[in-house]
Amino acid sequence: MIPLFHDFRGERVLVFGGGRVGYRKARRFAREAEVVVVAARFADEFEPRSEKEGDERPPLSLVKARIDPAEVGTWLDGAAPALVVAATDDAALNEAVERAASERGVLVNRTDEHGGRDAGSVVVPATVRDGNVVVAVGTGGRSPALSRELRRRIEPELAGAETVAAVTAELREELKRQGLPAETRRNAVRAAVESDAVWSAENEERAREEATEIAERVLDD
């Protein structure tokens, strides 16, 4: 498998299954996509929180229906999803979802299979995120437990990455405006990215100052 990032903004994801696995998948894709979840019943996690508790979770469209494997294709044709997730506890239904999606050229993730052809065309990796900086961890679907452990180990190392990305992107654009050669720009930006002072800066403004000072030293050499 080759890892890719897919932009789901403006797209629809169709999830079959209202259990905890279906909930986790739905919430993940709801960061960007419109998510429709179809199930005969839904786990407690799908219940909205009270106003007192507050609920900042992105909305999900829940459709309560019992799905016949023979009718899966009709659901896909009506929803026109970019991705389908088969997350039910019925292997025959999950297989029907995978088959219908494959016949229509739609991406499909099957949660009751790990690795190999039966997992569908998409394996959803464990991710670590700091703003727009995302690290994805996968094991070919073979060991979700290892993916989670690797995510746990990586997460502390990613702290501050969004700030570094923001200030070095600004630095790169400023050096381009100055008309500096590409190699010179790369050296300056690389020095800023590798600097502990930029990573440990107390705020974005200080990180920007540190990056600028480092770039100036590189340009002076």
Image (cartoon, helix red, strand yellow):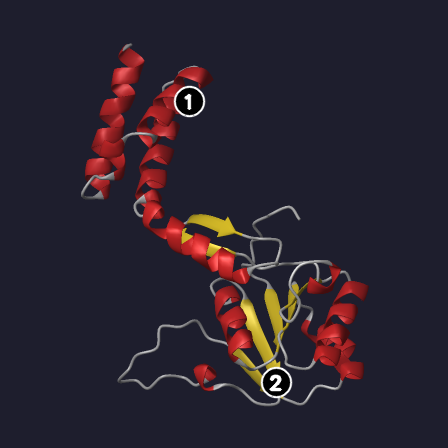
The dot on residue 110 is none
User: Is 131 on the left or on the right of 114, as rendered?
Assistant: left
| Front-most of residues 20 and 176 | 20
| Front-most of residues 95 and 34 | 95
Q: What residue is shown at x 54% (from left), y 79% (from top)? A: 61
| Front-most of residues 122 and 51 | 122
Residue 221 visible in image:
yes
- Tell me the residue that label 1 is attached to: 186
Residue 7, x across and y down, in percent:
56, 54
Residue 13 versus residue 117 in the image, above or below = below
Q: What residue is shown at x 64% (from left), y 46% (from top)? A: 2
Q: What residue is shown at x 31% (from left), y 48% (from top)? A: 159
Residue 167, x across and y down, in percent:
31, 36
Callout 2: helix, strand or loop? strand
Q: What residue is shown at x 38% (from left), y 26% (from top)? A: 190
Residue 208 visible in image:
no
Question: Badge 1, how many Cα within 10 Å: few under 14, some, many 20+?
Answer: some
Callout 1: helix, strand or loop? helix
Residue 98 versus residue 142 in the image, above or below = below
The dot on residue 39 is 2
Q: Where, by quadrant of the figure, is residue 118 drawn?
A: bottom right
User: Is 102 on the left or on the right of 119, as rendered?
Assistant: right
Residue 81, x across and y down, in percent:
66, 67
